[in-house]
Image (spheres, rainbow, N blue to C red):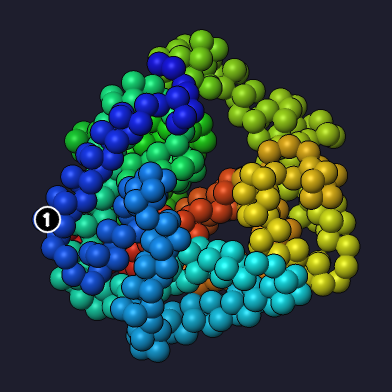
Amino acid sequence: MEIVGLGSISDTRILLYYVFVGLGAFHFVYKFGLNRISLFVLLIFWEGIFGFLAKNGFFNYDLYKIAVLSYAIIMYGPNIFEKKNKTDVYINIAFLLFSIFYWTTYFLNIQPIFTVASQFSIKYVIPFLFYHAIKDMVFSSKKTNYLLRLFLYIIYLQVAFSVLKVFIFGVLTESIVGSIQGAGGGTAVVLPVLSYFLFYLFKNGRFDLKDWLIITSFMIVAVASNKRAPVFIFPLFIFFTLTYVQKSIRAFTLLKYIPVVFILFYFGVKTNPSLNPEKSTWGSFNLRYAIDYALYYNFQTDNLLNDELGGRGGGLVLIFNPESLNLKSIDNVLFGHGVADVVTRKYGKFVGGSEYGLIHEGAIGVGAGIRKIYMLGYVGLISYLLLVFSYLRIIKNKKFVLAFLGLFFYDFFLYGDILFTHNSLAALAIFICLFSSRYKIRV
């Protein structure tokens, strides 16, 4: 099957796809009703269709963002001051600190206020308010059950939408991920793993054949967007949760789940055109080719001993060298160059190279840890990590925290930092954190 850009897909086919996405929204409302929380979830998980309508001139996309933010503040802003437990205090303090340092960066690097405020509101305020919207679920089995059924249904819909996308378009294209993303396909990397985490907790780590088929279906989201990373990380997180999180690591346990991991990896390589020599959606399994591609994609070399590493992975060395990030003054080192300095440039993301005064070349635009330092400095980086850790502190199972940290660090240092900044993924991640202490509940 051919891989093309979204521009090669006819408007008619895209419209047909979004007709089905819209029907999914109507069925969601029919199934779960329309209340404060379901409307909030609907607005952020059907972001793609709002983007499509805005792109076709039905309204200004900024109005959608303002509407979602306004709704969240009006409905759930007062919840910030309702202390339910110590976690509330930690999250509120962490968010306050990050906010102070974020806006300190703005005052040191005066840039377009609307751009700076928009980035702050959409990426950080809405996930923060979503936590306060559902934090009381830990005290209500009824609300927990309702949200569990709601999120599982949304996950299954994303799989169905991905299947429809392939059939309607007739080709693979990165852009459009289910109902949650209309431009780009980054969410297709993280969503399969998050979906598995919730399903793992829901089933208490005990899967029958039907469950394994459901778990495998989560990868369809990645396949439909031609994403390579899930081929490697999705089986690894399954293996980690079933061998380490669920029980102590033993030889029998390892032997029991290695075949499962290999089968998932095998089919992932064969169905991803980038990872097999034939560039086919059903090519041969060539392990050496797949590994070499992954190394070159992330490090611009197939030899990690090479001194001249590039790409996302190679960019990590810049973390320890502020001058190579063009952070030459004390203010820049502490608070960076500002958010608008990145999002208003040609590509709307951090691509590195001489344009930013960097020595390093390569696709480090999605190496978000580097981007965060460039935009917000080391103080901004540390305060943001504290905010994320305050969310993860909700999880009581320390082993499961490690699994979540693994996903976050991969996304943050080698990908795009979307786990806690893309509204739909952040909402799902926060729900999983809260649900993890009650995962024996059944729907």
Location of residue 199 with respect to 148 vertically, above or below: above
Q: Is residue 256 left or right of residue 186?
A: left
Residue 188 position by quadrant: top left
| Secondary element at tag 1 | helix
Q: From the viewer's side, name the closer residue of 93 and 122.
A: 122
Where is residue 419 drawn, in percent x and y? 48, 55
- What's under tag 1, amino acid-wise? Lys
> Can the viewer see residue 282?
yes
Q: Residue at x 44, y 72 (%)?
A: 128
The answer to whether 155 appears left or right of 127 in the picture is: left
Compared with 324, 128 (above or below) is below
Percent from the top left, x then y, of residue 32? 14, 60
What is the quadrant of the N terminus in the image?
A: top left
| Horizontal side of residue 294 vs 276, given as left or right | right
Where does residue 255 sit, x and y in percent of width and height?
41, 32
Disc 1 marks which residue? 31
Along the line of sight, which residue is nearer the eye, 117 or 428? 117
Q: Residue at x 71, y 58 (%)?
A: 341
Q: Quadrant of residue 381?
A: bottom right
Q: Residue at x 23, y 72 (%)?
A: 36
